[in-house]
Amino acid sequence: MLRKFVHRAMLFLIFMELVLPFFDPGGVKAASSITLYYNFEQGTYSTASVAAQYSSSATKTFTKDVSSLVGGTITGVTLNNQGGSGGNASFTATTITLTNLAGGNTTVYGKSETNPMHQIYRQPLGEIWEHKGSKTIPVEFDGASGNPSPYPGAIPLWGRKRYTLVDNFNYSDSGTFGPDLRYSFQSSLYSTNGASGDKVADYAKEIEGYAVTTAYGVSRATTWYLDQSKVSVGDLGADITDPDKLDQSTIAIIGAEKPSDDYGARPLAYGKGDIPGMGMIRTMMLLDGSVPAGQIVDKPDSDGSGGMLRNYAMYAIGLWSGTTYKYQMSIDVSYTAPIKADLAYISIDAGACVPQNTSVNITIKFKNIGVAIPSGDSFSVTLAADGTVFKTFTYSSGLGAGQMITESVPYTFSSMKNITMNLDSNDDIPEASASNNVLSQFITPQASCTPSGGNFSGTTSADKPSIPWKDSNLIKADWTIPSGCTPVQGRFILSQTTGEYIQYGWSTLTSTSTSDMSIFAYGMMGFTGYPGNITSGEVVIEYKLEDSCGGTSYFYEGKFTVGPKPPNRPPQFEIGWFADADYYSRTPISDSIVGDKLNVRLLPEIAPNHYDPDDDIVTFEWLFPSSSSNWIKSFPSMGYLKGEDKLTWLTASTTGDHTITARMCDDKGACTQKDATISIMRPEPLPCINVPNRVVQNRPLAANAINGACSKPAKNRTITEHFWTNNLSIYPNVGIETVTLEVKDNYGVRSLPENKAIKNINVVEDKPPVAVINLPIFAVRGNVLFRDLSYSPDGDVIVETSITYVYDSNDDGIFNDHMPLNIPISVGGSAILTAPKVGKYKLTVKTKEDWGLTNTRSYVVDIKNDSPEVSFTVTSANPEPPLFHTTSENEMLMAYGDQWQGSSLTNPNLNKVRDIGFTYNTATNGLTSHYGKQPFNGPATGLTITPEQYQKTTYSAWHTFPIPQLFNTQFLGNR
């Protein structure tokens, strides 16, 4: 038994020894899978999902090498066509081929604006209007009555050929295109060329006579939307911004609408335009006084003849539809990851056209899709033509996993050749598979070659690798020009892996252009944020270049990063009250009168800013219940909705101030509230009185000094009559005077009695001037200088000062010894008293103000001789000097307090400030007087007052002393 077992074991070992060499343990591979997504715009696969894309092609077929994404040999593929239907997927070790991939048939919608004008001319003398359509003769008719005719009015059925005298043009005749100028009920002209027909026929036949303008070349929409309810004229939120992505044969105009609900003109018919691919829209409007002012442009004749060219704007919005094909797909790829090196061919390329008997470069590409080949392991690659090797490449420096090799070899084709690339032609290295080592391609030379284009090589880049949110960046593309083709136009395409996408407009390129650039900025292209709604994160820059050979090249390498958004901020907006016809201005009104028609609305955005500083989606509502006004609280019961952006045709029915509140919130929850107040008043005007600040007894007032200019008429009215009481030009009595006013406006409406304006005027006394000179009390014989210091206590102007003097020759104090003598002096000027004798002189000063009041005052100066020189001796029983007791006084209290009294040598009781101009100067810490106002000496230097005797027990002293110079006016102010 044992012997039998040993025999069988030996046979098994011999069998395994013979069989094992035929197994390749290195070829055992681990199965893996990956999902790839295809970008139809860029023509590349990636591992990141790609948003739906659109094309004008109904089906697509293509082959792509995916070895850079698949880390091994492809063993299976599964197609997932999310955008459309059908399609077949096949594969090789490194490529995937898709055939008959059908896009999803998708209807999209767009809008375009057309701006036709109805041009009409009012002939000189101002009675007849004439107009002409693009397909009519000039036609005239009599306009609305007036001198001149203010507007054309309803157009009659019969007009006149220009400058004829009979009604010979039938506006309803389609053969003369009359319905292109004047609405004609269900005219056959409105249905020609497949047009829509009369779309307003259901309204009423009485609208015949409306003017008609026809735009025969309405441009197609340039931006397209999947949702018809979101379509706008601009490109805000558009799903497709490249109209070339639509099947051009399917684009058609499907409707027309007014630019806004309150626009004066409305569409009449629509259809195909005269130019293929364009549309036609007819609009209509009654040319009377109801046309909004913003739709009228006048240009009067310069000769004053009454002729005037007028243009009526009759704009419309065209509605369009078309078909595009939606593409969005992914491929589930199964593959085996090798544990050996694996050389795989990629391509053999001699160019789109190979010229016969001319040397061209054959370019080969291959890569290692297996593990790395270490340095030192050598292998060869051969190129053969019809089996004959003409080039061998040898590699011994190693080849990394996934590394690709590109080589070029010159070769001249005299006839068709089968070019074969053989990788590892000598089987020098162990490979996971040899099935992808050999690639053959037949190449047929041509007698002559026309370049096919599409072979530009280039790169894209950004000026800054990253930008903060809302900053701008410069995007660039650079390329080299191959032989045979030149650049024609190019455009940038930006995208993000999250699906954001924007295609720029075409740039026209010169034949020598090797670069292009553009800006990437917040708010451009009509977007509220970045173009294409690009958000924070990485942005891929693609450039699409079309050349003169009809080819298209793409460059992809450039990228940059947009920084994160800032913290959320609340919306900013304004609301206001307006006259009901004002739906566009930004200047609200603050008041109205009962019965006015009003609207209150959200003010429009000011480009480029938006309601929300972060460009978030916002919601808007009126807070009716929060108003203190019962009138505003009643708006919902009138049918007004809180979500409307404007509330129109409101009747101002309740007097008083009415405040309405609105709230706007963004989609993050941040909100802002704003108020707007309208003051509704009765139609009666409100009187108001302006009076002067100061009214003086018997003083004539300036013309219109007491007036009613502040009176307030109702809105759009003026005050025309004033009804006064006690409005005088002169008030003779001091005291309170009462003035009243009632007013009447230009509509004949008088103010209410209870609103009579009443104003009290305080009439003040006209005070006389004060005659003042700065005459000293004592002076030395000779000339005594003094100045006129007369003034008006109530600010009037001193116009005259006169001075006389009398010398008391007998020293009896009566001053009647001779007639008074004049001393010449001007107002505010200086004068000299000539006093040759010792004794008293009395000066009488009379001053007069500009309103006639006068004042007279007298001043006495005592003239002395010069003092003699004396000497004296002091004798005393006490050799010590007497003791003097001193106290410190506050200078401010001395000047302004009641404890110190002003006096002079002749008057012991004077007011310190009024009579002697006594004051304290903080700059010099000194006490000053207005008698020292001028920079002259007074009293004169050397003047002595003698004797002055100080007597005390056992002490007697005589002393003469000089009076020093007074200060100048440097620190004395205005006194």
Image: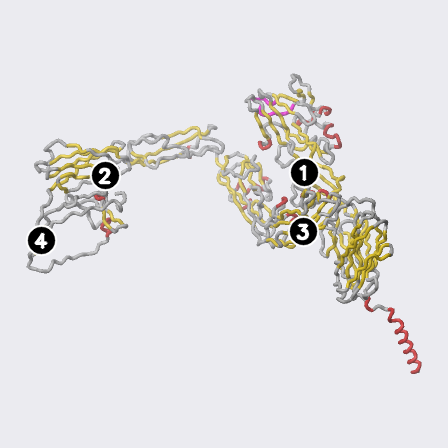
User: On the picture, is 66 further left or further right than 790?
Assistant: right
How far apart, in angstroms, are the residues tagged by discs 1 and 3? 34 Å
Name the disc covering residue 166, or none: none
Screen quadrant of the C terminus: top left
The outermost residue toward the bottom is: 2
Three-letter code for the amino acid on which mark 1 is drawn: Ser
Q: Position of residue 351 (x, y in %)?
A: 79, 50
The outermost residue toward the top is: 165
User: On the picture, is 675 further left or further right than 815?
Assistant: right
Check disc 4 and report the residue beneath it: 957
* 962 drawn magenta: no
Q: For residue 344, which quarter of the picture?
A: bottom right
Query: Reading the chain from its start, which is encountered first: label 3 or label 2?
Result: 3
Number of residues whose C-alpha sits closer than 10 Å to that of mark 1, classed few (under 14), some (14–19) or many (20 or more): many
Check disc 2 and report the residue beneath it: 789
Q: For residue 952, which quarter of the picture?
A: bottom left
In the structure shown, which secondary structural element does the residue marked by tag 3 occupy? Answer: strand
Three-letter code for the amino acid on which mark 2 is drawn: Leu
Question: Does residue 85 appear anywhere in the picture?
Answer: no
Query: Reading the chain from its start, which is encountered first: label 1 or label 2?
Result: 1
In the structure shown, which secondary structural element does the residue marked by tag 1 occupy? Answer: strand
Screen quadrant of the N terminus: bottom right
Q: Give the range drawn in magenta.
A: 143-155
Name the disc covering residue 460, or none: 3
How far apart, in angstroms, are the residues tagged by discs 4 and 2? 39 Å
Three-letter code for the amino acid on which mark 3 is drawn: Thr
Number of residues whose C-alpha sits closer than 10 Å to that of mark 3, classed few (under 14), some (14–19) or many (20 or more): many
Check disc 1 and report the residue beneath it: 112
